[in-house]
């Protein structure tokens, strides 16, 4: 199953990093790690969003991502595009990542 992340221009996603530090709290009877840093990994940045196409930058290369086919970013890591939300000036779309569970993929807070 793919990991789906809503993105807009300027969004940044860490691929392959590890969580460092932080504090574990209980939320809805489940542990949740907060206040951590990301160490290592590589950053994918969303360059542009235009309805059903997202342009991303990763490892110095720019890729056009659509829903028609997935793009290989690294060994075992693929990305494709979900539907555009069509709402106002702050439009966003979704990136769907496919990767082994051993490769952490998460949004970088901006």
Image (cartoon, rainbow, N blue to C red):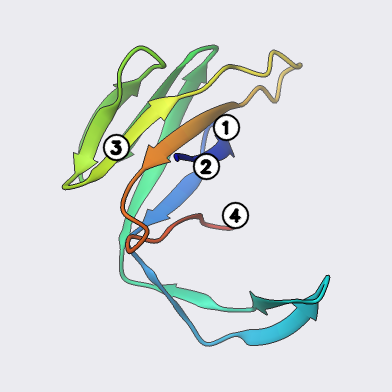
Q: Do the numbered discs 3 and 4 sit on residues whose CB atoms are within 8 Å?
A: no
Residue shown at 54%/30% (left/top)?
A: 94
Instruction: Name the quadrant containing residue 62.
Output: top left
Crowdedness of circle 3 by 10 Å Cα count: few (<14), some, many (20+)?
some
- Residue 93 location (% of width, % of height): 57, 25
- According to the picture, the residue beneath numbered tag 2 turns out to be 11
Callout 4 secondary element: loop
Crowdedness of circle 1 by 10 Å Cα count: few (<14), some, many (20+)?
some
State the residue in front, 85 or 44: 85
State the residue in front, 50 or 94: 94
Q: Earlier in the sequence, mark 2 or mark 3?
A: 2
Quadrant of the drawing holding the C terminus = bottom right
Left or right for 61, reference 46: left
State the residue in front, 100 or 62: 100
- According to the picture, the residue beneath numbered tag 4 turns out to be 110
Left or right for 105, reference 82: left
Q: Do the numbered discs 2 and 3 sit on residues whose CB atoms are within 8 Å?
A: no
Callout 2 secondary element: loop
Q: Do the numbered discs 4 and 2 sit on residues whose CB atoms are within 8 Å?
A: yes
In this view, 73 is above or below 47: below
Q: Distance from label 3 to label 4 (Cα)?
A: 23 Å
Crowdedness of circle 4 by 10 Å Cα count: few (<14), some, many (20+)?
few
- According to the picture, the residue beneath numbered tag 3 turns out to be 78
Q: Distance from label 4 to label 1 (Cα)?
A: 12 Å
Give residue 8's mark: 1
| Front of the two marks 3 and 1 | 3
Residue shown at 76%/16% (left/top)?
A: 88
Q: Do the numbered discs 1 and 2 sit on residues whose CB atoms are within 8 Å?
A: yes
In this view, 66 is above or below 63: above
State the residue in front, 71 or 53: 71
């Amino acid at each position: 199953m793919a990991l789906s992340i809503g993105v807009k221009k300027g969004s940044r996603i860490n691929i392959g990093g590890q969580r460092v530090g932080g504090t574990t709290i209980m939320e809805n009877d489940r542990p949740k790690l907060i206040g951590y840093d990301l160490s290592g990994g590589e950053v994918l940045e969303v360059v542009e969003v235009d309805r059903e196409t997202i342009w991303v930058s990763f490892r110095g290369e720019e890729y056009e991502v659509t829903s028609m086919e997935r793009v290989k970013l690294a060994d075992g890591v693929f990305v494709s595009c979900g539907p555009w939300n069509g709402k106002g000036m702050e439009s966003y779309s979704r990136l769907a990542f496919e990767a082994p569970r051993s490769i952490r993929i998460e949004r970088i807070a901006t």
